[in-house]
Image: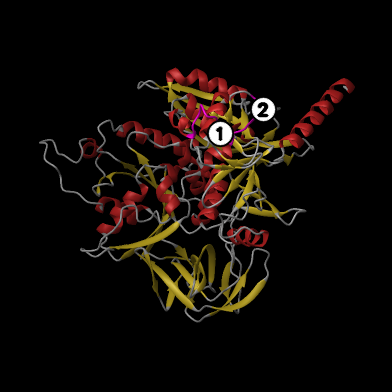
Amino acid sequence: MYFRNDIRNIAIIAHVDHGKTTLVDAMLKQSHVFRDNQMVQERVMDSGDLERERGITILAKNTAITYRGVKINIIDTPGHADFGGEVERVLNMADGVLLLVDAVDGPMPQTRFVLRKALELGHKAIAVINKVDRPNARLNHVANATFDLFVDLGATDAQAEFPIVYTDALTGRATLDPHLAQHAFKDKQGNVVPSDLQPLFDTILEYIPAPNIAPDEPLQMLVTSLAYDDYKGRIAIGRVFAGQIRKAQEVMRIDVHGVMEKNKIAELFVHQGLERIPADQAAAGEIVAITGIPEVYIGETIADALTPKALPPIRVEAPTVRMTFGVNTSPFGGREGQFSTSRKLRERLFKELEHNVSLTVDETDSADTFIVSGRGELHLAILIETMRREGYEFQVAKPEVIFHAGTRGEKLEPYEDVFIEVAQDSTGAVVEMLGMRRGQMTEMQHSDDGSAHLRYRVPTRGLLGFRSKFLTATRGTGIMHALFAGYFPMAGEIATRSHGSLVAHEGGVATTFGLSNAEGRGILFIAPGAEVYMGMVVGENPREEDVVVNVAKKKHLTNMRSSNADVAVQLTPPQVMSLDDCIEYISEDELLEVTPLNLRIRKKILNNEERGKLKKSAEKAREAEKVMA
């Protein structure tokens, strides 16, 4: 085994809004990846529209810079636990990590998940304390909290002896001197000390180990992500662990079950900056992209054709939440989407499995319905929003958790460790809400700034639909993060919904007159002029029962009334529901109709009379069961 000193492979770990993408921007600029006159947008690593809108990293991406003759491959990692499949894949390519933390907030809960995975793989870490220019920066406190996090996650002695680099990513400055960082890069005389990111680059070269390679062994490359090009076809991206890989080389593709298939590499690329550069060959330790293997999948090994040896496949934790996806069966079905058939829906869902390794899709007895399982509500919501923007039209049911059977046959359900930061005057409301959802408090701390930090263990069932209520109770100031804790015994019944729905009585166009009558029953979701159909949910009833309202009702005209009389009616603006809001809102007897233009909540049974009869028969059956008991 040899160490390849001309390469470093690092992954960046950071919480949302701690400056990870800004730091990568600065590293790219200072390594002269861009021309001096080149127009470069901010947050170049946030490639998708959804990533820019939500301010989160969803798909891991690679870039590379060269410093003092050493190539530094930088791997961007998602910070949210729902995208853990991405994290587990990309950490296999890295030899070390940069842990980026805010100089005020310190290490946050979402950082724990990725860091724990990195430490389990034996990676060393460099702590980067960013935003040191903030007026209330707490460098000593954050450094101590970071060390405590390493100890809490079971870091070895070598891993716990990590260096600390203080940075201001926005201006591209770094220092190893905490005194200089505390005073915003000013010396004792108040003069600004010229600085760049050189201390960070030097620390990476010194502390992050070079790739441990076997150059004389047969080729072994682990495929960790996929891309697609209209001309080149499927592109497999991964790290070469042994041997050499060459353009036009004959190789053996080994799938996760050990089945082998001979192929030939068409093109070979390495990363430089934000681009893929064609190459004739690459040695072990390098991260490469190859084309010419049409059936390659994530987790497979590209090996030498004569002496094929498989690498250990990527292990990904099982999904915990599932949703039912189906063809849109509403009266408006097929009107707004480009792809609305079951064949197109099936093709798209199974295509997602090629790169979304923590997702599973199961077919049902109905050809129009599929069960999609993922790591959390956000994981599935991103898929729904992506498909919607691609022109797909479909309907989804309420998320539900996936249960497991224990060793003794008992029923187990997933639990989450929930980290909450709220103002102290909102603590009582949050404690009451989580108590009703079977949450158990494990820690409570009060800060000098008037905030309270709570840690709970809550069944995943209890968190479905909780976020919007939490934000309402804390007046939008509360911060909540959840991490999967494991499977534990069932917690009993949980009442997660305390409201009902306002349901349209008949189809038509919503009128001001009809909406003004319905407004007294609750909060409306639609405005005058919106098309509705029988069974469509048009608002929220603060009480638990559903109420049927006629929002398409028109005022009868007489010689004493004119059609212009509605102009004087003042309606409260409707509540605009985002996709996340809709997913949290729907109940077991409702569906969410998703189209490129609209999101509509509807009842599974659209006919109001049929739904009422079914409800009465269910109530009679429950009463009969009580009598028998």
Residue 74 x %, y % = 39, 57
Q: Position of residue 1 (x, y in %)?
A: 48, 66
Residue 558: in magenta span:
yes
Residue drawn at x 60%, y 72% is 253
Q: Which mark is residue 83?
A: none
Q: Are marks 2 and 1 in contact (CB under 8 Å)?
A: no
How far apart are the alpha carbons under marks 2 and 1? 17 Å
Which residues, given as a range, are shown in magenta? 544-563
Query: Circle 2 sits on which residue?
Result: 494
Q: Is residue 360 left or right of residue 454?
A: right
Indicate the amino acid at tag 2: Ile
Dominant secondary structure (helix, strand or loop) of the stretch shown in magenta: loop
Is the residue marked by circle 1 packed among few (<14), some (14-19), or many (20+) residues within 10 Å? many
Dot placed on the residue nearer the N-terminal end, 2 or 1: 1
Whether the magenta-drawn stretch holds residue 401 is answered as no
Q: Is residue 373 visible?
A: yes
Q: Which mark is residue 417?
A: 1
Q: Which residue occupies the extreme front position in the image? A: 559
Q: Is residue 148 left or right of residue 295?
A: left
Q: Residue at x 70, y 27 (%)?
A: 493
Residue 449 spot, x, y in % from top left: 35, 22
Q: Position of residue 287 (x, y in %)?
A: 44, 65
Q: Is residue 566 above or below residue 255?
A: above
The residue at the point 23 percent across, 47 percent down is 171
Q: In the image, what residue occupies the spot 58% across and 67% down? A: 301
Left/right placement of residue 572 relative to residue 534 reads left
